[in-house]
Every structure is written in structure tokens, then in C-alpha cells.
Image (cartoon, rainbow, N blue to C red):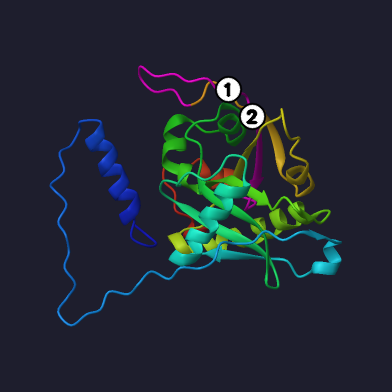
Amino acid sequence: MAGTPKLTACGRLLERLERDGLVKLPRLQSQSPRPGSKRRAARKLPEIQAPSLSARLADVAPVSLEPVTATALVRQWNAAVERYHQLGYRSAFGYRLRYFIRCDSLYLGCVLLSGAAKAIAVRDRWIGWQRHERMANLSLVLNNSRFLIFPEVRIPHLASHVLGQLARRVQDDWQQHWGFRPLLLETFVDPRQYRGTCYRAAGWELLGETSGRGLARPGQAYASTPRLVFVKPLAGNFRQTMRNDFARTERVA
């Protein structure tokens, strides 16, 4: 597989299979430090302090997206989202990439991209996917599963500005981190609380709503509520590539 080793994702998958009774894993083995080596203490950074800031976008520019990959910074990001986002933080499974929204030394918010929803009727019809095409190409869709501007940051147009930056840079960031280039962004918005104004302003297209039934699993069901489905293409020929029976986007400019 391209990109970095998928050790964490594979480990979680094996644990899930063991819980379901499908595999039996061997006992964990403790690892002793190599002779002469010193175990480095984990670097602990202070918790992100969300600023209180009211300003015009032009007055705080440039605002940037900073990929979060270092372990200590990941912990900071996780803690900030858990504290300030209404949905909190749940560990993303598989492909994911975190960003801090920054202005000089200030942290203004957080962004998370992760794997796409397995099946969304309005999205799949819009792309023109048959089931086998969706299964082959789903990894080319990224879900903006967390988007957070800290609660005391009041900068008009900041959110749409950040989403514009994200669309322009995410293909290169994903290529560097995971080894391939995505073709589509998606996100879901709860219409009971939001209209998706920042996504509309950033050029995302509203496709419709989810069914509200959640992900169906044999013998299981859970209640959900319909969400607005927004998408943002990242390449002009995305449909042609995503309707192939195979996908890796080194061939997409």
C-alpha cells in the first residue's frame, strides 16, 4: 500500500475482528528496551488555549492551515476538539489528516479529514456510481468530519476562507501523507442547527439529505436524523476517474 504504514488502522481492525469472534489473537508481548538505550519521555505540551478575538479577516491575515502529525501536537488537537466541538472527538479509523487553523502564534480552530461515508444515496447518484465502482473508489472521497472555529473567535468569512484553502492544498497534503490524491470532499450538516453557510460560500454544492437511517448492519439498526450533504470536487475530471473499476490518482494532475 502507498503512503505510511497502516499499523494503527490494522491493529484496530484485528481487535474488532477478535471482539466479533472472527479471529483469535496471540497474547501481547512486552518489549524490553534495547541494551544501552534510553526510553524517551513523551513530550507533553500545554493544552491549546482558545483565544478571544474579534477582528476583520484582512486584519489577521495570513491565516494558514497547519497539518498536525507530531504525536504531541495530535494530543493537543484531540483535546481541543474534545473540549470545544459539540460532537467531541472520536478517534478516526483508517485514513485521516488533522489541521490546526493558525494566525501567527494563535490557534483559531481545527479541521479533520477522514474516510468517506460508505454509502450515501444522493452522493452516489450524483457521481454516477455503481456499487462495484463505489467500492473501488471510495478512498478518493474525504469526509470533513470535524470543522471547528473556536467559540470566542469572531472573524467574518474566516470559515469559508479556511475551506477555500483546504480545497486548494488537500490533494498535495494527502499525497505526501498517504501516497495518493483524493478527488472529492464531502461533509454532513445538521439542518436543525446550521444551514451550511460557510460551505455554500466556499463553493461546496448541496446535493440533498441523507436518509436518516444510519449505516445498516445485519441485525442492527439505530436512529439518526437527516443531514445536509455538501460536496466539493478537487479535479475537473473527477467523475471519469471515480467511475473506473480501479483507482489511484497518480495519473490525475
- Magenta-drawn segment: 215-237
Dominant SS of magenta comes to: loop
Does 235 sit above or below residue 13? below
Instruction: Give the residue type that dot 1 points to.
Output: Gly
Question: For numbered disc 1, what is the local secondary structure?
Answer: loop
> Callout 1 environment at 10 Å: few (<14), some (14 to 19), or many (20+)?
few
Contact check, label 1 and label 2, Cβ < 8 Å: yes
Give how far across and how far down residue 240 sits, in percent: 56, 45
Q: Position of residue 90 (x, y in %)?
A: 48, 44
Q: Residue at x 79, y 69 (%)?
A: 61
Image coords of residue 72 (percent x, y)? 46, 66
Q: Does residue 137 appear to the left or right of 151 in the view shown?
A: left
Give the camera-side residue of 7 and 231: 7
In this view of the protein, can residue 253 be seen by the observer?
Answer: no
Distance of mark 1 from mark 2, alpha carbons?
A: 7 Å
179 relative to 18 in the view: left or right:
right
Compare residues 155 and 184 and report the one nearer the observer: 155
Along the viewing direction, whichever of 248 and 226 lies nearer the viewer: 226
Depth check, front residue: 105 or 161 = 105
Residue under numbered circle 1: 212
Q: Is residue 246 above or below residue 153?
A: above
Viewed as shown, does residue 83 lie left or right of 152? left
Q: Secondary structure at mark 2?
A: loop
Horizontally, residue 154 falls left or right of residue 80, namely right
- Numbered circle sitting on residue 227: 2
Mark 2 nearby-residue class (10 Å; few <14, some 14–19, many ≥20)? some
* Residue at 35% over, 16% down: 219
- Residue at 58% of width from left, 36% of height from top? 127
Please tell me which of labels 1 and 2 falls first in the chain.
1
